Image (cartoon, rainbow, N blue to C red):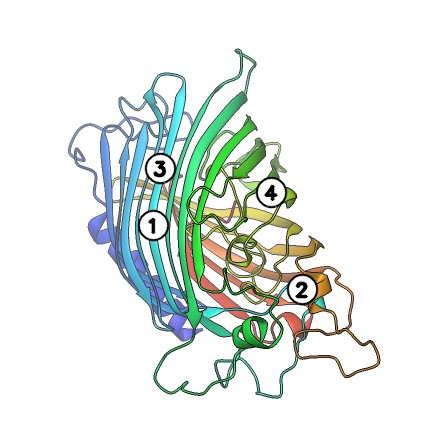
């Protein structure tokens, strides 16, 4: 806990010392809520100081760049850019640039994300949730590398959104995505000769096929519909966001027969609970589902959440900091899955400092999810039901995975959100420890 508080203090000092407005000396104007109306450019260079229970301590640099134009849309921005270079102490790193431009082109929202991830210790717990073997004679994740592999990934996502024939809050969307994924067994010093679950899936069982074992290229064409009545995109207090997307992944590059068509559905709703001050207390919930319709999916892409626009850097699940906080990252993966999150967002403090608007909020939460469409279940099952189960097969049915916890948010100008979440899985098979995640933004 002391380390968490020190990290939060470092973030506060960094924001206070560096997130200055370019035209701060001009006369301030206020809206009906008493907030300073931001205009023009607003820069937020920050040292990245964070913590993810699955990844370790994070350090690096990042910069948020906002443009509010004449301030008439505040707290909405005209466009935003972000750059980040950071790494985690458990061997992962990120180089990222993304832009969110809702008003640069008339009636068109544009979104671009270019990211390179590398992970020397990437978690792999097998397929289909509780169906996968939970125990290993090679000891636990905390002691060795049985549940780790090496993975590097380059990601490009470009999306656009336009009004749907003038219907209020309804939009059609289109996008392109490209992923280059490289996978290998863990190769860090000290893990020589380590038996891993990845090795067993590749060599002993062929659940992971030889032509996909080391990754490949994935190209996606995305088409969808969005309904969006939220009052704000980063820190909404009312409204609905619903997204339905079809994702086609033609086998254009590798030619290994892994073309497929899948769907993604998301529903988010934000309900103000205080009739006097609608921004004070909000019940927020998200329901999501994804599944394959036809074709075949390579194993290294089944945990990717194929959304048009996203707030968090990582778009993989289930488990970890963006879907089920407290459940092991990548602990619940399959061909199709459902998940849900419920949060009570209570803004306990509002103040102004260094010419910026600030809020402090608490968000107790409950997360849940499960595999609904299994991936290569027949290959995982033992051929003789009377024999001892192999390590990769538990003999149990999949059911709901759950976690609960609480978060603390520091919000600047309703757009830059420093986040701390602490969550614990409700079943020890999904993780035994209370997990802490320090980063940016709400998860939805």
* Residue in front for this viewpoint, 108 or 159: 159
Figure check: 337 above or below 423:
above
Query: Residue at horizontal 67%, vertical 60%?
Result: 376
> Would you name the residue on which mark 1 appears?
115
Examine the image and state in which quarter residue 158 appears: top left
What separation in Å lies between label 2 and label 1 (alpha carbons)?
Answer: 28 Å
The image shows residue 375, relative to residue 36, as above or below, that is below
Q: How far apart are marks 4 and 3 (CA)?
A: 26 Å
Find residue 284 and name its label. 4
**Would you say the residues marked 4 and 3 are in contact, meaning their CB atoms lie under 8 Å apart?**
no
How far is disc 1 from disc 3 in space, using C-alphas? 10 Å
* Closer-to-camera residue (345/224): 224
What kind of element bears circle 2? Answer: helix
**Residue 389 pos. (x, y %):** 74, 79
Inter-mark Cα distance, 1 to 4: 29 Å
Q: Mark 3, residues whose alpha carbon is within 10 Å: few (<14), some, or many (≥20)?
A: some
- How packed mark 4 is, by other alpha carbons closer than 10 Å (few <14, some 14-19, many 20 or more), is many
On screen, residue 356 above or below 191: above
Label 1: element kind: strand
Instruction: Looking at the image, tell me whether mark 2 or mark 1 is earlier in sequence order.
Output: 1
Q: Earlier in the sequence, mark 1 or mark 4?
A: 1
Position of 415 with respect to 53 (left or right) is left
Circles 1 and 4, Cβ within 8 Å, touching? The answer is no
Q: Is residue 384 left or right of residue 390?
A: right
Give left or right: position of 65 versus 190: left
């Amino acid at each position: 806990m002391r380390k968490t508080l020190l990290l939060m203090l470092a973030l506060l000092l960094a924001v206070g010392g560096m997130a200055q407005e370019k035209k701060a000396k001009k006369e301030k104007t206020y809206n009906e809520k008493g907030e300073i109306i931001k205009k023009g450019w607003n820069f937020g260079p920050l040292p990245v100081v964070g913590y993810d229970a699955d990844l370790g301590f994070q350090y690096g640099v990042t910069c948020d760049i906002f443009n509010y134009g004449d301030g008439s849309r505040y707290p909405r921005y005209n466009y935003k850019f972000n750059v980040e270079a950071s790494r985690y102490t458990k061997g992962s790193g990120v180089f990222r640039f993304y832009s969110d431009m809702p008003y640069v082109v008339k009636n068109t929202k544009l979104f671009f994300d270019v990211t390179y991830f590398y992970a020397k210790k990437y978690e792999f717990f097998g397929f289909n949730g509780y169906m996968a073997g939970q125990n290993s004679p090679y000891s636990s994740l905390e002691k060795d590398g049985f549940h780790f592999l090496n993975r590097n990934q380059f990601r490009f996502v470009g999306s656009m959104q336009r009004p749907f024939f003038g219907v209020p809050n309804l939009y059609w969307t289109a996008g392109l995505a490209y992923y280059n994924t490289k996978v290998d067994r863990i190769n860090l010093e000290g893990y020589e000769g380590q038996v891993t679950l990845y090795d067993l899936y590749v060599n002993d069982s062929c659940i992971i096929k030889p032509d996909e074992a080391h990754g490949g290229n994935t190209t996606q064409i995305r088409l969808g519909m969005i309904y969006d009545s939220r009052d704000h995109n980063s820190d909404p207090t009312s409204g609905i966001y619903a997204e339905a997307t079809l994702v086609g992944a033609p086998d254009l590059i590798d030619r290994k027969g892994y073309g497929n068509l899948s769907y993604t559905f998301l529903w988010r709703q934000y309900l103000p609970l205080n009739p006097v001050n609608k921004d004070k207390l909000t019940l927020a919930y998200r329901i999501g589902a994804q599944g394959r319709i036809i074709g075949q999916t390579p194993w290294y892409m089944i945990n990717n959440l194929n959304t048009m626009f996203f707030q968090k850097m990582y778009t993989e699940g289930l488990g970890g900091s963006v879907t089920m906080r407290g459940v092991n990252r990548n602990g619940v993966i399959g061909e199709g899955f459902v998940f849900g999150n419920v949060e009570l967002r209570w803004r306990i403090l509002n103040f102004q400092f260094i010419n910026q608007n600030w809020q402090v909020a608490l968000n107790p939460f409950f997360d849940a999810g499960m595999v609904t469409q299994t991936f290569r279940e027949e290959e995982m099952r033992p051929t003789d039901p009377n024999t001892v189960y192999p390590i990769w097969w538990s003999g149990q049915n999949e059911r709901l995975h759950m976690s609960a916890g609480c978060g603390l948010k520091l919000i600047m100008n309703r757009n830059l959100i420093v986040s701390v979440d602490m969550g614990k899985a409700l079943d020890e098979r999904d993780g035994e420890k209370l997990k802490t995640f320090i980063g940016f933004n709400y998860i939805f």
